[in-house]
Image: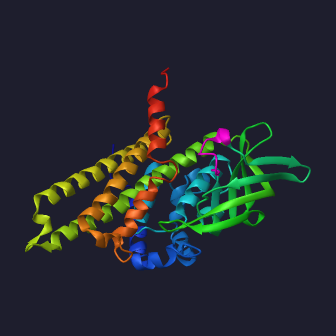
Amino acid sequence: MDFDLTDDRRMLNDTLNRYLEAQYPLSARNAVAYQAPFHDPGKWSAMAELGVLYALADVASGGMGGTGFDITTLFEPLGRTLCPEPFLAALLAARLLASAGQPLEDLLSGQVTYAVGYDEPDMGGALEDLQTLAISDPQGWHLTGRKSVVYGAGVAGRLLIVARLPDGLPGLFEMTADCAQITPFGMIDGGAAGEVFLEASPATLILRDARAALADALDAGALALCAEALGAMDVTAATVLEYLKTRKQFGRRIGDFQALQHRMVDLMAQIEQARSITIFAASRMGTDDQSRAVSMAKTLIGQTARQVAEEAIQMQGGIAMTWEHETSHFAKRLVMIDHQLGDTDHHLARVIAGLQAPSG
């Protein structure tokens, strides 16, 4: 397997890294990530003008990427700066729209922001428990129900909603955001989400059976979170290493103490192992093994991200838990990534189920 970036991906990575380093230092990030609208619309438009959103879709859908490695190339720099812009919502929407054969130009150009509502308060991610209902009448389709923790809902212009059709199938619907009641909120680690309430809300059916499309979109989203975690873990580990090199106690740098050296080496080894499984998952996108590979990566990433967050605070001390210290923000994001799009337990169960599935 060739681990080197292609020229296009290297250009995307370099362009995004330079922009984020210049425009999204942690102070600027924290100024927008924790108060409405929980992102910077100007920076979102600027990044869209750079063309980075076109990496979310393949050429046939109007993009310039769409592969697993395009996703990881885009999301790892986002993790390095804890960028709160609604890229995850854009990725989920791009995969669903492409599966439904819908045009993506408005999304990829940044002209329209999308959010995807699929989970519900008592659903737990299982489509069998889908409660949002779609009813057809002479005026068209209307949706009634509630969607929870919809990433980017408060800043979206259009919504993609999964609802139960009269025949029981989960259909995918598109609607304007003003047709729903949206209660936006900021997540504890920064960034926007929202609760979406639907009451006979008019919508357009774009895909009658959304099971395969939704599974693909959630796999892509989970892979993106793995890559984002890698970027955040790299920065966190570098911060800890610098602290060990400069902080002195008892007249010596604390990095000279062998116990801390061993802990740091173990931490770096865990991060590299997480990187390897993420690369593997990216390589399996578009294959029959996609879901299992992504769940393997999300399981290990969840475990490693939490370990990195805890060790970073332990080795730097109480200062790393303060608002002013960057580690506190990276630690929050790393812990929260485990809970997005299925936590460690959820994805471990998927891996086990795959191992137990009959062959042939």
Q: Residue at x 49, y 50 (%)?
A: 222
Q: Is residue 239 left or right of residue 96?
A: left
Image position, residue 28 (x, y; %): 44, 79
In this view, which residue lies farthest toward the right?
138
Residue 282 seen in this snapshot: no
Image position, residue 153 (x, y; %): 64, 64
Image position, residue 266 (x, y; %): 22, 52
Question: Is residue 208 depicted above or below 194 in this figure?
Answer: above
Of 356 and 282, the residue lying toward us? 356
In this view, which residue lies farthest toward the left?
251
Question: Is residue 150 depicted above or below 346 in this figure?
Answer: below
Q: Which residues are magenta?
A: 118-129
Magenta part, dominant SS: loop
Of 64 and 269, the residue lying toward us? 269
Q: Is residue 54 left or right of residue 179?
A: left
Q: Residue at x 33, y 49 (%)?
A: 274
Residue 83 seen in this snapshot: yes
Does 202 lie within the magenta span? no
Image position, residue 37 (x, y; %): 59, 74
Q: Hey, which quadrant is residue 185 in on the image? A: bottom right
Total marks in image: 0
Q: Residue at x 31, y 61 (%)?
A: 234
Of 335 and 209, the residue lying toward us? 335
